[in-house]
Image (cartoon, rainbow, N blue to C red):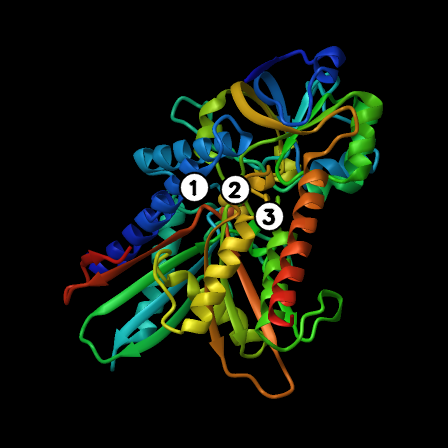
Amino acid sequence: MPDPLLDSLIELIRRTSAELPDDVNAALVRSLESEKKGTIAESALKIIERNIELAKRKSQPICQDTGSVVFYVQCPVGYDQIQFEETAREAVKQATKRGFLRQNSVDSITGRNDGTNLGPGAPAIHFHQHRFPQLEVCLILKGGGCENVGAQYSLPAEKLEANRDLDGCRRVILDAVLQAQGKGCGPGILGVCIGGDRATGYEFSKQQFLRFLGDRNPDPVLDALEQDILKTANELGIGPMGFGGRTTLLGVKICAANRVPASYFVSVSYMCWAFRRQGVVMGPDSSIQRWLY
Amino acid sequence: MIPLNYPFTEEQIRALQVGDEVGITGVVFTGRDAVHKYLHEGGSLPTGVQLRGGIIYHCGPVVLMDAAGQWQVTAAGPTTSIREEPYQAQIIRDFGIRGVIGKGGMGDKTSAACREYGCVYLHAIGGAAQVLAECVRKVRGVYMLEEFGSPEAIWELEVENFPAVVTMDSHGKSLHREVFAASQSALAERIASKAGARHP
Ligand code: SF4
């Protein structure tokens, strides 16, 4: 029986894995232009560009680590989420068979990889309702190397002289950039959440990756912090792959969540240059109506 | 780009400096966590694996068998090298390796072994799975596939013009160490100046 939702989700996975979204491509092109000619930073970015072009042409994964599979679903009131989840799992399984995803999911206790990319928490699906009739599905493929360099700070952080204020936030976020160098395949993108608890902090920091790279934060305080971190990080000379150079970060996105008075977390998620996120708006027949990025 | 052709001699390796871009042509063997641990614990190399004067590549490639029964590499980017830091120095010494390809760099123990035995660390571009797979001309063989599974097996690959950057040379220099130190002091300045500006 044909299942248009299944087909749409497989196509979403394929395109996310093989094609970088336009905003990320544009940022990489700009960074290539800004690097000094003849440096290894420039060579690294040129190889990255060639890789992006090749993956798209061959419809093959941009990076062999196709990451953890994270769906963000905006659905109308009354939508059958159980049905969606079943279909999404089937889509992941079939996309893996067709090589759009690597066999990338391991049982944490036994170490077994059954080759389906399905298991507890895999894929992860976040549902939100909205008061519109259409279904919107975003997908992020989050690589392991860059996930490993994410960091959560609890302020005050004495060693970094980071207090419970914006200057303290700035210090720990820049420390995360310093520590991530050479790992996580830079130039990278930061998603940050100030506040929340240990779980929501990371959750909201990851949601920042759904924002367009070129957008501006509507909160002027957070906007200023984003611009400052981006500028400062790119003055540190870490560069692509940590080879040295002008492009350390392509973007910084920060949000805030309320906290309890006793806690002050700053959660930093790091995304590698292989920033694989896409999204679709689906029509009433579950076919893809529009791409979001 | 400096061509680096198999067999890799000590002289050729000693001539390389941190920051050199090389194009590797010849045979390389993949090896990651399982292989390093196995060799470190005294395991012997399977016959056919020639590490002496050779290069080991930290990579878990995606390899498929085509209709004609030939192995085809479809993705072949580097994996993070620092996980092999406890083992690498000993393996460079015992097996006479001349080059290690990976990403993210390695630590002081490996750097010392590179200096003592004439080896270099070659940084490939992380995530560039498609470009690097195109440099793999042929899969010449696979070893320990049963024991370790596909990503962890030893794949014997023939590569052509495989691009990498020397980030640790055989003279004790490490680009990783240099960039970290420079960026750390650049950051210290920028943190101090900001705090100073706020509380003059
Ligand atoms: S950090 Fe990103 S680009 Fe690097 S290997 Fe992992 S998924 Fe690929």
Question: Is A136 left, or right, of B34 in this rendering?
Answer: left
Q: Is residue B112 above or below residue A107?
A: above
Sequence-earlier tag: 2 or 3? 3
Q: Residues within 10 Å of mark 1 (few under 14, many from 20)?
A: many
> Chain under label 1?
A
Label 3 sits on what residue type? Leu
Q: Earlier in the sequence, mark 2 or mark 1?
A: 1
Which residue is depicted at the point 31% across and 48% down?
A22
Residue at image mark 1: A31
Tell me whether the residue at label 2 lies in contact with that at label 3, contact meaning CB atoms closer than 8 angstroms.
Answer: no
Q: Is residue A121 visible?
A: no
Q: How busy is the neighbourhood of tag 2: few (under 14 within 10 Å), some, or many (20 plus)?
A: many
Task: Give the SS element for disc 2.
Answer: loop
Discs 2, 3: same chain: yes
Q: Secondary structure at mark 1?
A: helix
Q: Residue A229 location, x and y as percent?
A: 52, 59
Q: Determine whether the residue tagged by mark 3 lies in a helix, strand or loop.
A: loop
- Gap in angstroms between the C-alphas marked 2 and 1: 8 Å
Q: According to the image, label 3 marks what residue?
A: A236
Dot 3: chain letter = A
Residue B133 percent coordinates (x, y): 47, 28
